[in-house]
Image (cartoon, rainbow, N blue to C red):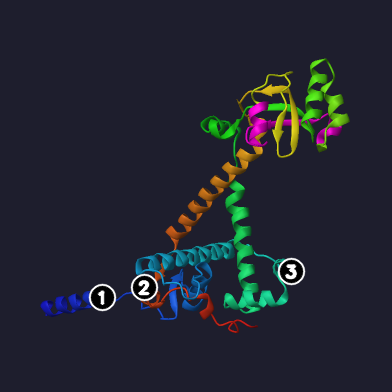
Amino acid sequence: MRRAVLLLLAAGSGACARSGPPPLDPSVVAMVNGEAIPRVEFERELDLAFEIPDGAPSPAPDQLLALKRTVLQGLVDRQLLLQDARARGVTVSPETVQRAVARFKAEFPEERFREALAQGRLTEQEFEQKTAARLIVEKLVDSVVYERVAVTEEELQAYLDAHTAEFQEPEQVHAAQIVVKEMDEAKKLREELRTGARFADLARAHSLSADARMGGDLGWFPKGVMPPEFDKVAFSLQPGQISDVVTSEYGFHIFKVLERRPARRKELAQVRREVERLLLREKREKAQGAYLAALRERATIRTNETALARVTGPRPVAARPVEEARP
């Protein structure tokens, strides 16, 4: 009797061990916390993410698998964020969605908008739903993830100290010019300057350049901004020195260097916004990645490998039916 009971228990234990979650429906590529990602949506996203021109070779099998995994991961992440938004009560109003759709439609003529829907295999209602989902995710990330991200003064200065070469201000000169059409006139003006005439006065009276009204003042410039022949002369002169006549395609020039500024490192005050924007973007990307990783860790995600394998890849653009997504 005891042996029979043990055999019965063993048989029951084996049956339980073999049983598991039921196979996923072939029309579903994944389940995220019990919510399906339909295969048709996956195929549509794959088409949008990787457009292959008609006649181009199909991706290699390993490349195709990587493409499919990338798209599926994006869909899973979006589903996780939408579920989290729902749990937190994050919503957007229908009016907000309609305004976003209207702004998008305003960028295209009506026919182009219809073509865009067709290429995405979307009805207008589905496009509105996708827009609503995007806005909800953006609102969640802004209010929950990005709200906690900030850049400190110490981080700004540390980044600047570690990237000195990226924030160098190159050597610059502050110069003025006189430009005329004829060499004889240029030589005459150069002689007048040698005998004491004021450079700015001669520039206003004779120069053909637009800067003549400012006494020929070209402002500050580093190497590489002006034509090479200008750089060669301007950066060879010291403040107060006047060049010989220089020939270019624009005419005949005389230059005077007013000031020089050596190369120097920019101060934090000069680049604060640029560095803060860069660090904020980096920290936000890391924070969003960590937030998604935490959502994935707590989630139950099942991938339908069979359905995924049956997806042959992005369809060539010309093979996508134009009328398919007409509302």
Between circles 3 and 1, the one closer to the viewer is 3
Callout 1 secondary element: helix
Counting every numbered tag in the picture gives: 3
10 Å crowding of disc 3: few (<14), some (14-19), many (20+) = few
Label 2 and label 1: CA atoms lie apart by 19 Å
Q: Residue furthest right?
A: 205
Q: Which mark is residue 305?
A: 2
Given residues 78 and 175, the one toward you in this image is 175
Q: Which mark is residue 106?
A: 3
The quadrant of the picture occupied by the C terminus is bottom right
Indicate left or right for 258 with 275 as reference: right
Given residues 12 and 327, the one toward you in this image is 327
Residue at point 61%, 59% (across, down):
138
Label 3 and label 1: CA atoms lie apart by 57 Å
Q: Three-letter amino acid code at disc 2?
A: Glu
What is the magenta range? Answer: 211-234
Q: Is residue 218 magenta?
A: yes
Between circles 2 and 1, the one closer to the viewer is 2
**Residue pointed to by mark 1:** 18
Q: Position of residue 42 (x, y in %)?
A: 48, 73
Q: Position of residue 126 (x, y in %)?
A: 61, 76
Q: Position of residue 139 (x, y in %)?
A: 63, 58
10 Å crowding of disc 1: few (<14), some (14-19), many (20+) = few
Given residues 56 and 91, the one toward you in this image is 56
Label 2 and label 3: CA atoms lie apart by 41 Å
Residue 107: which quarter of the image?
bottom right
